[in-house]
Amino acid sequence: MQFFLIIALLIALLAVFFAVQNTTMVTVYFFVWQFSSSLALVLLLSLAIGVILSLLLSLPRIQSKNWQIIKLKKRINEQEKEKDTIKEQIAEQLGTINSLQRQVNEYKEKLLVPPKIIVNNESIKATTEDEQTDFSK
């Protein structure tokens, strides 16, 4: 964009130099009209008309680009909303996963703890071939 601005300023500067050096009167004929003025004024008027015409001719392209930009911004907003929704769903799923993992760990701990065996000392007796031993004493 800066390149085009520099080029436009150079053209304007050249037009001013041309206008200052060429002050003679000229007559411009356009169909049935006739216009007499200094060459500088005719040049500046022609330059201004050229700028206006080029802007008018580029308006459809500019407008279509603006519509495209609006559509793309709308699409970006929709995708950002979708991204936020997906992030929320991921956070919920991670919470569920963490909760289930805690439950699994609790169940593992319960399964790994050896069961407590309550033994009544009076009921344990061992017998051998020779004798019967009472372990309760």
Image (cartoon, helix red, strand yellow):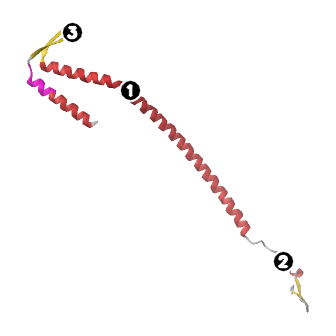
Mark 3 is on which residue type? Answer: Phe
Q: Which mark is residue 119?
A: 2
Give the prevailing secondary structure in the magenta stretch. Answer: helix
Indicate the position of residue 89 as horizontal and vertical percent values: 59, 46
Which quadrant of the view contains residue 3?
top left
Mark 1 is on which residue type? Answer: Gln
For image coordinates 82% across by 75% down, the residue present is 118
Q: Looking at the image, is 106 positioned above or below residue 44?
A: below
**SS at badge 2:** loop
Seen from the viewer's position, the closer of residues 113 and 41 is 41
Q: Give the magenta part as a residue range.
A: 15-23
Which of labels 2 and 1 is toward the front?
1
Indicate the position of residue 62 as horizontal and vertical percent values: 36, 28
Label 3 – label 2 distance at C-alpha: 125 Å
Identify the residue under disc 1: 63
Which of labels 3 and 2 is toward the front?
3
Q: Name which of mark 1 and mark 3 comes first in the sequence.
A: 3
Indicate the position of residue 79 as horizontal and vertical percent values: 51, 40
Q: Which mark is residue 31?
A: 3
Seen from the viewer's position, the closer of residues 3 and 77 is 3
